[in-house]
Amino acid sequence: MPDADPEPAPTGGFTPEHGFTNDTRSTKAGVEKIFSGPSGARRWSREVEALQRFAGTGYPPQLVDRSRSELRVVTRLIRGVNGAEILRAPQSTEAEGLMRSAGRVLEDLGRDGVVHGDFGPQNLLVTDEGVRVIDWEWCGALTDPDLDAFWFDFIVRYHYPHAASLLPTFWRACGHDPDPRRGRDVLLSAFGIRVAECSPGSPAIDSWRTRRDWVMQRFAELGPMT
Ligand SMILES: Nc1ncnc2c1ncn2[C@@H]1O[C@H](COP(=O)(O)OP(=O)(O)O)[C@@H](O)[C@H]1O
Ligand SMILES: [Mg+2]
């Protein structure tokens, strides 16, 4: 497990990865995230609560500052390589290692009853001391204990399909059962919760529908939902 002790703030920047919907930038104080878009206040509250509540696990970045009125959160910069960047070179030994580490992190978080809610390679930072987990704004909104495993699997297949052949390593490491029927049901219900937090008429709704159709297609032979 990574070390949660406070350390001197590193300087320098970071590279944002796929899926970032807020305004995030590197400042002297740390990484500043301003929550933009629909349900910003709700996402802000969830992120702040999770950063505080799960600090002891050693995985979230350290909360440095926050402002409810500005929907702003500042966290300590974590020096690491984003998991999505690693998956762009899926032949690398790092990609297989990322799958194994992601599975172990999930198993560890699950033991503490944590459901992250947006657990994917884009929200993992690989550091010299281990893997850290960022972007906790969906923590608490989605509570199915299997969600994070199926979400990770989905994100890899959908956004990084060339790395999907490495997923068995992830499933072995996380200790969850990759039952396809359960996966489909968990994902479709999570997509529904995501849509419920979109503004009416928002283009994001279409992108969740596209994902829903993709999942239905993938599991077409399974029959009706349970
Ligand atoms: N504490 C941090 N240290 C280093 N990089 C970070 C940190 N917090 C966020 N980032 C970077 O900013 C990007 C966007 O942050 P994230 O919390 O994932 O926002 P979003 O909800 O918009 O996806 C991440 O992909 C990551 O590269
Ligand atoms: Mg993110």
Image (cartoon, rainbow, N blue to C red):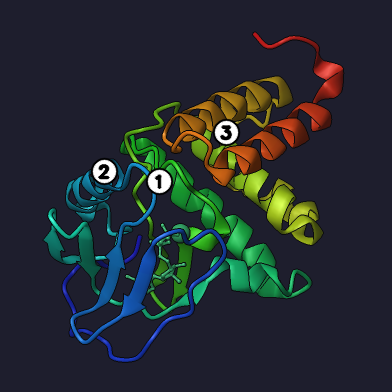
Amino acid marked by disc 2: Arg
Element carrying mark 2? helix
**Residue located at (79% from left, 72% from top):** 91
Q: Where 192 sits versus 90, above or below?
A: above
In the rendering, which numbered label is found on residue 176? 3
Q: Which residue is mark 2?
A: 46
Q: Which residue is mark 1?
A: 108
- When asked about the image quadrant of residue 2, the answer is bottom left
Task: Report the Cα–Cα distance between label 3 and label 2.
Answer: 25 Å
Residue toward you, 144 or 41: 41
Between label 3 and label 2, give the one nearer the viewer.
Answer: 2
Could you tell me residue 15's position as x and y percent? 48, 79
**Side of 141 where 86 appears, left or right:** right
Residue toward you, 85 or 105: 85
Residue toward you, 116 or 204: 204
Residue toward you, 58 or 11: 11
Q: Quadrant of the C terminus?
A: top right
**Side of 84 where 167 appears, left or right:** right
Q: Where 119 sits versus 115, above or below?
A: below
**Residue located at (28% from left, 91% from top):** 11
Q: Give the mark nearer the N terminus: 3 vs 2.
A: 2
Q: Is mark 2 within 8 Å of ligand 1?
A: no
Q: Quadrant of the N terminus?
A: bottom left
**Side of 108 where 99 appears, left or right:** right
Whether residue 171 can be seen here? no
In the rendering, which numbered label is found on residue 118? none
Farthest residue, direction right: 221
**Residue located at (62% from left, 21% from top):** 185
- When asked about the image quadrant of residue 214, the answer is top right
Could you tell me residue 89's position as x and y percent? 73, 75
Amino acid marked by disc 3: His
